[in-house]
Image (cartoon, grey):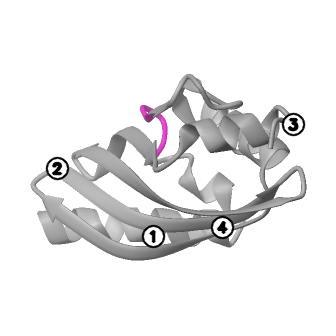
Amino acid sequence: MAQNNIEIVREVYSKVEAGRLDELQPLFESLSVMEAEGLPYGGQYRGFDQFKQLCQNFAATWDQFSLVVNKILAEGDEVVVLLTVTGVIRGARVKMPVIEVWQLSNGKPQVLRPYYFDTKLVADLAAGKG
């Protein structure tokens, strides 16, 4: 089961990177994403339509964004992804580690919690304080 969940999450990253968000709709009907409140796009997003809104809010903060999946670990229905994110926020280049914890049920993501190494840096730069 853990290996199957790894494949599901890996496919999500592939589709997001390719800009094929609409293909995620069947998987994300019940998804709840919890971004840190201190971020410009912080808050809870539920379901596919709010996930798309999160992506728009995220893109309004980050320019030239890219991510590298360094490692994916899983046990049962929990998948942990170690990432490196790189981008530009108001002209400042940012590169930092992020961990995303996914909880799946019956092959569908239910909860996603991203953990940024430095949420204060992202918030300060987005507010023009950097």
Q: Which residue appears at 45% of the width and 66% of the height? A: 83
Disc 2 or disc 3, which is closer to the eye?
A: 3
The residue carrying pointer 2 sits among few (fewer than 14), some (14 to 19) or many (20 or more) residues within 10 Å by Cα, namely many
Query: Considering the numbered disc 1 on the image, is that residue within a helix, a strand or a loop?
Result: helix
Q: Secondary structure at mark 2?
A: loop
Q: Which residue is mark 3?
A: 128
For the point 45% across and 70% down, the residue is 11
Q: Position of residue 96 (x, y in %)?
A: 54, 62
Q: Nearer the viewer, residue 49 or 125?
A: 125
Q: CA distance from mark 3 to mark 1?
A: 35 Å
**Pointer 3 and pointer 4: residues touching (CB < 8 Å)?**
no
Please give the residue where the numbered disc 4 appears in the rendered image.
Answer: 86
User: Separation of disc 1 and disc 2 at Cα?
Assistant: 16 Å
> Disc 3 or disc 1, which is closer to the eye?
3
Of helix, strand and loop, which mostly describes the magenta segment?
loop
Residue type at mark 3 is: Gly
Task: Identify the residue position indicated by label 2 in the image.
Answer: 77
Q: Quadrant of residue 75?
A: bottom left
